[in-house]
Image (tube, helix red, strand yellow):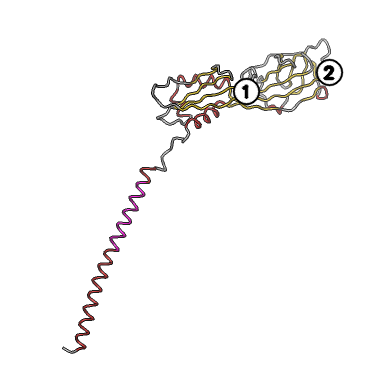
Amino acid sequence: MGKKDKDKKQKMKKIRKNKKNIGKKGAVTHIEMILSFVIFIGFVIFVLVILNPFKSRAPTNLVEFAYEKIENELKTNISSISINLLKVPTAPATCFSINAITDLNCETGKIIVRNVNDADVDYSLSDRLLIVYDGNFYTIYCSSELESSGSLSGCQSFSESDYNLGIIKTKEGLSEKGIISFRDEYNTKYQEVKERLQIPANSDFGFIISDLDKNSLFKVEKEIPRGINVVTQNYPVKIIYSNADIKNAVISVSTW
């Protein structure tokens, strides 16, 4: 066999050997791709099962969450404006009437009128505001929390030049009526209230409102089982009463 034939034979062996190696490398690469894909799918399943981004989560600070929900349920406001008369009714009139103060956005009968000594004064509200004369200075309070008005007639009509109006002031707070209604619903339809406030199914809540001397004003709370972890947080609030009184208070919200 000549030298050329030997060289040719060796080249053919190298080519066959290289083809085998390429085949092996291709198989290994294919297996690595499959393993990588399986690992990736496994990781995705782990994230979905363990972290579950689609599941609705309980708030990280449940007591804060509960307070915000309670506040939204109970909050209301009350507006007030002062009136300073520049004249007095002429006898025999014992009351006077002024234009209804539309900027107050008062519902019919949802106001209270008080004199300079903060005593209630009889009034009537229709297209005009009628007030029993009791001095030259009055404050009108307007809120959906307030009681209905009375009925007056025969009042002397005052024009806008006969009195001065002050600036409208508005305060926010928790509604006394709302608290009482919420307490009744809490005691009779607790699960419905809990679902409406989006409190997690495996948690409970309640609250107590006290005055600044720590006297309890309203208790809206279930009996808490012994040995259970309870988180309580206090928040300063104002209570708006149906007689237009506004009192500072503290609401203690608990979750367990």
| Residue 234, image x, y percentages | 53, 26
- In the rendered image, which quarter is residue 194 located in? top left
Secondary element at tag 2: loop
Q: Secondary structure at mark 1?
A: loop
Is the C terminus in the top left, top right, bottom left or bottom right quadrant? Answer: top left
Magenta stretch: give its range: 29-46
Q: Position of residue 227 (x, y in %)?
A: 38, 23
Is 150 left or right of 32, judged from the image as shown?
Answer: right
Q: Residue at x 34, y 51 (%)?
A: 41
> Mark 1 belongs to which amino acid?
Ser
**Nearer the N terminus, badge 1 or badge 2?**
2
In-front residue for pair 9/106: 9
Image-quadrant location for residue 50: top left
Left or right of residue 153: residue 215: left
Position of 222 compared to 234: left or right? left
Relative image position of residue 55 (x, y in whole percent): 41, 39
- Residue 79 point in image, percent of width and height: 67, 25
Local crowd size for mark 1, using a 10 Å CA cut-off: few (<14), some (14–19), many (≥20): some
Q: Is residue 31 magenta?
A: yes
Badge 2 density bin: few <14, some 14–19, many ≥20, Cα 10 Å: few
Residue on which the image places disc 2:
87
Gap in Å between the C-alphas at discs 1 and 2? 31 Å
Residue furthest top in the image: 92
Q: How many marks?
A: 2
- Residue type (three-letter) at the residue carrying disc 2: Lys
Judging by the rendered image, the residue that carries numbered circle 1 is: 144
